[in-house]
């Protein structure tokens, strides 16, 4: 699971539950935007390892069947605070 430390535990539990129920991958979507955390089943690890350069897992998953989107209204799940500017923008 790609998991940021500031993501609500409830979303993480829902993603893990979707994987346990057989989803190839799962992640929340907030107002149509992909959010965090994203869980990827071990069956996809070889494909993820093969990604290189600026390719990201999102590209791998976007047209794949078996990816479960979990609706959320938690806008905080769509952004990440890595810099002081990010913090200012979120305040």
Image (spheres, helix red, strand yellow):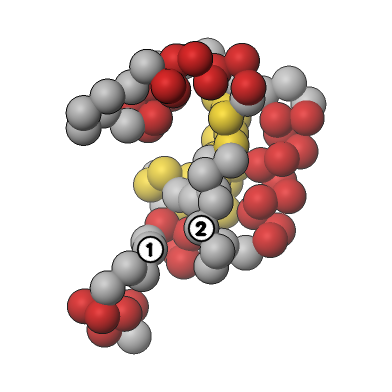
Q: Residue at x 38, y 63 (%)?
A: 80
Residue 39, relative to residue 61: is it above or below? below
Q: Please state the horizontal and vertical placement of residue 67, each as a whole percent of the image.
A: 55, 24
Which quadrant of the view contains residue 44?
A: top right
Q: Please state the horizontal and vertical placement of residue 8, each as a whole percent of the image.
A: 62, 64
Horizontal side of 16 relative to 6 (left or right) equals right
Which quadrant of the view contains residue 11?
A: bottom right
Res 85 visible = yes
Which residue, given by chain and number where applicable, does mark 2 sit on? 4
The residue lying toward the viewer, choosing from 38 and 43, is: 43
Q: Secondary structure at mark 1?
A: loop
Q: Quadrant of the N terminus?
A: top right
Which quadrant of the view contains residue 85?
A: bottom left
Are the residues tagged 2 and 1 within 8 Å (C-beta)? yes
The residue lying toward the viewer, choosing from 87 and 32, is: 87
* Crowd around label 1: few <14 · some 14–19 · many ≥20 (10 Å): some
The residue lying toward the viewer, choosing from 52 and 62, is: 52
Q: Quadrant of the C terminus?
A: bottom left
Residue 83, relative to residue 48: is it above or below? below
Res 89 visible = no
Q: Which mark is residue 17?
A: none
N-terminal label among 2 and 1: 2
Label 2, label 1: how far apart the Cα atoms are: 8 Å
* Crowd around label 2: few <14 · some 14–19 · many ≥20 (10 Å): some
Q: Please state the horizontal and vertical placement of residue 25, each as a whole percent of the image.
A: 58, 27
Which residue, given by chain and number where applicable, does mark 1 sit on? 80
Q: Please state the horizontal and vertical placement of residue 42, each as a whole percent of the image.
A: 63, 22
Q: How many marks?
A: 2
Horizontal side of 79 relative to 54 (left or right) equals right
Q: Residue at x 39, y 30 (%)?
A: 57
Q: Residue at x 38, y 47 (%)?
A: 33
Q: Residue at x 44, y 23 (%)?
A: 48
């Amino acid at each position: 699971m790609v998991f940021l430390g500031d993501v609500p535990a409830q979303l993480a539990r829902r993603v893990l539950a979707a994987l346990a129920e057989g989803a190839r991958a799962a992640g929340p979507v907030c107002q149509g935007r992909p959010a965090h955390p994203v869980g990827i089943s071990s069956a996809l690890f070889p494909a993820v390892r093969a990604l290189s350069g600026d390719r990201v897992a999102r590209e791998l998953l976007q047209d794949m069947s078996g990816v479960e989107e979990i609706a959320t209204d938690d806008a905080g799940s769509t952004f990440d605070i890595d810099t002081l500017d990010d913090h200012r923008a979120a305040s």
